[in-house]
Amino acid sequence: MTTSAPSSRPPRAELHVHVEGTLEPGLAFELAARNGVALPYPDPASLRAAYDFADLGSFLELYTANMAVLRTAADFADLTRAYLTRAARAGVRHAEISFDPQAHLARGVPLEDVVGGIASVLATSAADHGVSTLLIASFHRDKPVVDALDVLDRLLATRAPIVGIGLDNAEIGYPPGLFTDLYARAREAGLRRTAHAGEEGPAANVRDALDLLHAERIDHGIAVVQDPDLLTRVAAEQVPFTVCPVSNVRLRAVPSLTEHPLPAMIEAGLLVSINSDDPPYFGAYVDDVDDAVTAALGLTRDQRAALAAASFQGSFLPRDRVVAHL
Ligand code: ES4
Ligand code: ZN
């Protein structure tokens, strides 16, 4: 995979990346050795070869299994640092990074170690990597809302440095309406709100995330093109959509990049940004995604500039910080 120097790419933000999904096979093996954890693969290359997914479910299975190597605050710090180092090379100047608190609590890793490890690196990301950062706690939609409420309360009680919340994991069978209480509490606490919706689920999930959860941003949202009225509405409201075209192809939500609904979303006037989601799992950091999308869809220079601008406009940065990036 080739990577150009940052100067050859327009500055951009990355708004949709799961820190656990940035775990490179090499680092996974390093952490496994450090923590005395066994991985069911002989070496990093064999693990990477397993990154061939039939759907979201098969990806989530491996993604969750690999978290076994993440045990200590230092592990989470190393993971976060590795992502920022690579993201800086991709031209990323601001990153809004999600993490899955429930996944680690379920494995007996204290919340303080997870948050502390990630936050220790984010605190100096601008100075160390030239990347400003914000942290998002993402909740599992396939777990009960009471679990999520409990974790959110703990994050708030410990003054975890999060800007907002998200909703991820399996979408089908777990509609946004299950999480109205969670999003209401987050909103009351002054947190920003994003949610995965319309990734493998229907356009109605995008509408419900907006209307029932008061989500300010939609992660993926590609199903929105199936509902012309909703498409018109989200264009008028300039709802940010954090689209991950390579992820969608690798998880077979879309058959190929050339058939991706991104052009239809751009055409409809949506505020769309391009993101990586889980870069090593899908074989592409955000610069690689930009290149692949440009090649497959023949994006113009102006369209690419608009996508880069939208990555800042859709961020949770204060208005003056957004303007400074444009
Ligand atoms: C995810 Cl691609 C994707 N979809 C839903 N949840 C996720 N968590 C990490 N990656
Ligand atoms: Zn995602």
Image (cartoon, rainbow, N blue to C red):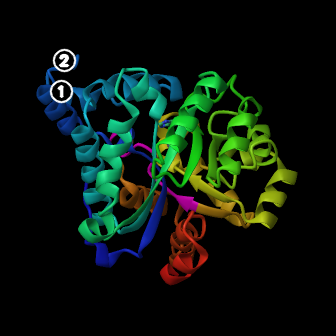
Quadrant hosting residue 85: bottom left
Q: Secondary structure at mark 2?
A: loop
Dot placed on the residue nearer the N-terminal end, 2 or 1 = 1
The image shows residue 125 at horizontal and vertical percentages of 31, 63
The answer to which of 262 and 317 lies nearer the viewer is: 317
- Give 156 or 27, whichever is nearer the viewer: 156
- In the image, is residue 11 above or below residue 157? below
Tag 2 residue: 38
Crowding at dot 1, Cα within 10 Å, few <14 / some 14-19 / many 20+, comes out as: many
Tell me the element at label 1. helix
Residue at 52% over, 41% down = 157
Q: Which residues are magenta?
A: 273-281
Q: Residue 20: x, y in percent?
A: 37, 38
- Is residue 277 part of the magenta span, yes or no? yes
In this view, 69 is above or below 229: above
Residue 216 placement, left or right of 245: right
Separation of disc 2 and disc 1 at Cα?
6 Å
- In the shown orientation, is residue 307 left or right of residue 184? left
Above or below 299: residue 199: above
- As drawn, the residue found furthest toward the right would be 229
| Foreground residue among 163 and 237 | 163
Residue 242 - label: none
Query: Toward the viewer: 76 or 160?
Result: 160
The type of residue carrying mark 1 is: Ala
Mark 1 = which residue?
Answer: 32
In the image, is 271 to the left or to the right of 306?
right
Classify mark 2: residues with Cα within 10 Å, few (<14), some (14-19) or many (20+).
few
